[in-house]
Image: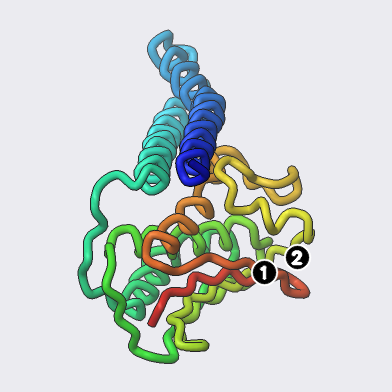
Amino acid sequence: SEQALAQERAERALEESRREVITWMSHDLRTPIAGIRAMAEALVDGVAADPERYHAEIVALSKRTGEMVGDLLSLATLEGGEGALAHEPVALADVISDLVAQLAPLAREEGIELTGGADDEIELRGDPLLLYRAVQNLVVNAIQYSPAGGRVEVRLGREAEQAVVDVIDSCGGLRVEDISRMTEPGWRGDAARTPDAGAGGAGLGLAISARVAEAHGGELTICPLQQGCRIRLSFPA
């Protein structure tokens, strides 16, 4: 039947998507793992020029590698529909205030002004950890792509009976042809819009945020601005 054929095509597409993600992750994980091994061997052999820096780099690379693996597991779970989402009250204003406080040191380090606020007290029922991660991914992404001296703003409000979280950055604008691909797993754009490997990871942040929104009956949309872009998570209010 047509329904069975459609289901089979969807399953093949999902399997192909998973294979692509595994391929991308395998490639991206080689770099930090090779770096950790090279620095560890230099320390063991006593030939490290700056042991303290090597120790710090190993810790940073180990942390980022763990985050990349976590991203892969989250995306696989969301795309495969495995496990039930939590269904708890989530105060989005608290999510934003907590994230702005948590990410303020990263923003300062990058020379970015990070601000956030809520126009309304809005509560969703959903998975608090996934919703937090979805917004966090957008804010971290905005900080990494904005140049020093730029500004990132996070706002919560209501629009057309939707709860909306807007993250507005100073990335310098987007190419129209890139917008439709930005939530594809593994896509990171050209070199001009790709942060360094240590910060940029495997290009799964926006993909995970989009899947989290969809799992909660919402969506992620991207709007180019004159000097940046606005990425919006919208949910049924």
The residue under the point 53% across, 75% down is: 166
Q: Is residue 177 left or right of residue 4?
A: right
Can you identify the residue that label 2 sits on?
173
Crowd rating for badge 1 (residues with CA inside 10 Å; few <14, some 14–19, many 20+): many
The residue under the point 30% across, 44% down is: 82
The quarter of the picture where the C terminus appears is: bottom left
Asked if one can make out residue 101 in the rendered structure from this viewpoint, the answer is yes
Marks 1 and 2 in Cβ contact (< 8 Å): yes
Image position of 235 with respect to 52: above or below: below
Image position of 116 with respect to 182: above or below: below
Residue 34 location, x and y as percent?
A: 50, 20
Mark 1 and mark 2 lie on one chain; the one further toward the N terminus is 2
Residue 14 location, x and y as percent?
A: 49, 38
Q: Secondary structure at mark 1?
A: strand
Q: How many marks?
A: 2
Q: Is residue 81 left or right of residue 5?
A: left
Image position of 31 with respect to 83: above or below: above
The residue under the point 66% across, 51% down is: 181
- Seen from the viewer's position, the closer of residues 110 and 22 is 22
Kindly report the distance in space between the C-alpha atoms of the residues bearing marks 1 and 2: 6 Å
The residue under the point 58% across, 62% down is: 142
- Seen from the viewer's position, the closer of residues 12 and 32 is 12
Q: Secondary structure at mark 2?
A: loop
Residue 4 location, x and y as percent?
A: 46, 40
Crowd rating for badge 2 (residues with CA inside 10 Å; few <14, some 14–19, many 20+): some
Residue 171 found in image quarter: bottom right
Q: Amino acid at mark 1?
A: Cys
Image position of 194 with respect to 149: above or below: above
Q: Amino acid at mark 2?
A: Gly
Can you identify the residue that label 1 sits on?
229
Residue 56 location, x and y as percent?
A: 42, 35
